[in-house]
Image (cartoon, rainbow, N blue to C red):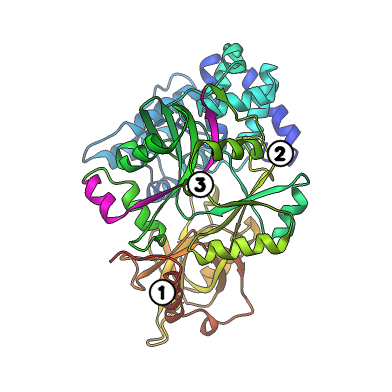
Amino acid sequence: MEATRSRNEKIEQISSFICSLQPGEVPVAARFLTGRVFGEQQVKKMGVGGATLWKLAKADSLQVSLLPTETGLSLLDVNRALQSLASLSGADRQQRAENILQGLFSRFSELEKKYGFRLLSGEMEIGAVDGVLLAAIAAASKLELEKVRRAYMTMGDIGRIAELALTSPSVVDTARIIIFNPVRPMLAEMATDIREILESHKDGTGFEYKYDGARIQIHRQGDEVRVFSRRLSDVTASIPEIVTIVKDHVASKRALLEGELIAVDDSGKPLPFQDLMRRFRRVHDVTGASSRVPLQLHLFDILVAGDEEIVDRSYAERRKILEEEAPHDLLAPSITSKDQGEVQRLFDEALAEGHEGLMAKALDSRYEVGKRGKKWFKLKRAEKLDLVIVAADWGYGRRTGWLSNYHLAVRDESTGEFLVVGKTFKGLTDEEFTGITKRLQELKSSETEFTVTVRPTIVVEVAYDEIQRSPHYKSGFALRFARIARIRDDKSPDEADTLQRVRGLYDQQFSRKGMLI
């Protein structure tokens, strides 16, 4: 799979593979192929950090196996070991976790170790994205792809879908949305300009505000309302005011809606994302938190209205139904337009009000999951800084052997010191990882087990979504969603952006956003 770029060939390979498995192995294989160990709605976490993986990768010898040794490892053996890893607790959890992993890896071949590391880091890098796997499941089971996609949307676990498709296809064939069972969200591609969007959507585009908030899914059955996060976790208890809003203002007694939550200050300006997350995740003193950090709800889609499931209706139809279900002030502002100037004005208005930009949705688009297609785009203003790499961590999993997690710094004009404002491993190609690893080793000034500190020489252009306050960095700031856009060999460290500029950009954010006192 890793050797081919052909999507059809990958589908054929996976289809043939899962057909060769025992029924109990199918869900495990499907999850592993996509870099998952658990079903998406399972709350379990492996609790294996980068340091543990790094130690495992660098270990000269591995401890005696903790698994039965009379036969070779099966998929189920590996799955049981990883499930037991997730169930560990207690003060000695770290050591016990390392023992399990060492025992497991001692039985792996070199090739199995390679993919074992990738699985543990969630980066299989073999092209088995959800859309490819769903197509392979459809081919293996002889079910219609749209039926498989719908089942995945409603059930949320690709392993379970694979298992049912091969053993109980009628369950997949007739899958419907069940209220209070969260569905997987539709995703969007990033767009670089308005023209690109308009050219992709031949039948027209709806443009909506894109908020810097938390995407939520609201389920209602009679007087019961439950709210789920983007990751399908139940967050109802943390946001009781949203439950009240839905009960009071949504027309249908049975509904499934999607929206975005933002936190606002006393004047109604949106607060930074990190302030929203503190409020969104709160489980204690929820009443007090709701008064200190009010939330606003902005609805943008509806999948169930009354007794009707409307995911197969077009976006234009769903938007019209949504407008009938909820009052205007609860909806994301929206226009339908083919005029670049009109769209640009809406984009500028969204930015001026402190929001991220626009969502662009093809008017004829159905609600689909499993792939990032061109039916939905997100249009944001890219913020960028020129930063200096001052250190880098050794990678693990697929990035083993590369210095690939870069410590990014700005220059303090008053002292000349380079101060870290974030880290990232995103944005570079494999060739660039290899080249920059060699360059950084030549610039090494000191080294620990995990990290190489280097002379501040290499400048990189870094895109980011927001500047946040950070108690973890001496600079006092951190970049949200930092990713390297390009290596700036044309710039010297003296030309990098300064701490003073970062402070100014942070303050500028509050010309559009609110601030907690």
User: Which amino acid lies under the numbered mark 1 shown in the image of this protein?
Assistant: Asp
* Residue named by callout 1: 507
Tell which tag, 2 or 1, sits nearer the viewer.
Answer: 2
Q: Residue at x 57, y 33 (%)?
A: 33
Indicate yes or no whether the magenta region holds residue 292: yes
**295 within the magenta span:** yes
Tag 3: Cα neighbours inside 10 Å, few (<14), some, or many (≥20)? few
- The disc at residue 117 is none
**Residue that numbered label 3 is attached to:** 328
Mark 3 or mark 1, whichever is nearer to me:
3
Q: Residues within 10 Å of mark 2 (few under 14, many from 20)?
A: some
Q: CA distance from mark 2 to mark 1?
A: 41 Å
Q: In the image, what residue occupies the spot 60% across and 40% down?
A: 319
Q: Which residues are magenta?
A: 285-306
Q: Residue flagged by tag 3: what amino acid is it?
A: His
The residue lying at 52 percent from left, 42 percent from top is: 118
Q: Disc 3 to disc 2, how far (Cα)? A: 22 Å
